[in-house]
Amino acid sequence: IAAICEWYRVVRPGGIIYLVVPDRRFTWDRHRSLTSCEHMFEDYARGITDCDATHIDEFVDNVDWSDYSPSTAPQDIPDKKTERKKTYRDAVKAGRIINIHFHVFEPCNVLDLFTELTKNPLTGLKLAIEDYEERFPAESPNGFLLVVRSHK
């Protein structure tokens, strides 16, 4: 939500925001629960950033390790999980960004999020979805595309 608010702030009135969003059905997130709009708004209100340890355990414990780290033997996964969690926590302590999927998306919850963003007084965004394409980009269709217009 913070990213969308920032993009909205800098885009001119009538401007377009393009979002390519990873779709859990086609990524290592396939076994993780979809993130609710409520959860995303709670994280936004709490100021959760990409330098935050809040989502490390859920991410590491629930990604599909056969996709996330295909070279890791199944018997080594528990140790790798422990190691990865430590690496991410050490990065957060040092103030570095961690590269994980904090939230999990499918078109339904992202479309719901945009509906809520336009209603929520916390954000006050005036956005309209102009176009949507599933299975994007063509060369690696593990996400979806949203084209959103600003109506500020």
Image (cartoon, rainbow, N blue to C red):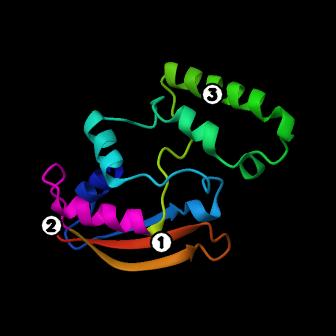
Amino acid type, callout 1: Leu
What residue is at 60 percent from the left and 53 percent from the top? 29
Q: Is disc 3 placed on a helix, strand or loop?
A: helix
Count every numbered label the image shows and give the total: 3
Q: Which circle's residue, 3 or 1, is located before the other in the chain?
A: 3
Amino acid type, callout 3: Lys
Q: Which residues are magenta?
A: 108-126
Task: Name above or below for residue 131 compared with residue 15.
Answer: below
Task: Look at mark 2 in the image and give the residue it sits on.
Answer: 152
Residue 118 inside the magenta-drawn segment? yes
Q: Is disc 2 placed on a helix, strand or loop?
A: loop
Q: Which circle's residue, 1 or 2, is located before the other in the chain?
A: 1
Expressed as whole percent of the image width and height from the top left, the position of residue 115 reads: 26, 66
Expressed as whole percent of the image width and height from the top left, the position of residue 77 reads: 78, 35
Q: Quadrant of residue 48?
A: top left
Neighbours of disc 2 within 10 Å: few (<14), some (14-19), many (20+): some
Task: Look at mark 1 in the image and give the residue it sits on.
Answer: 145
Task: Look at mark 3 in the image and give the residue it sits on.
Answer: 85
What residue is at 27 percent from the left and 62 percent from the top? 11
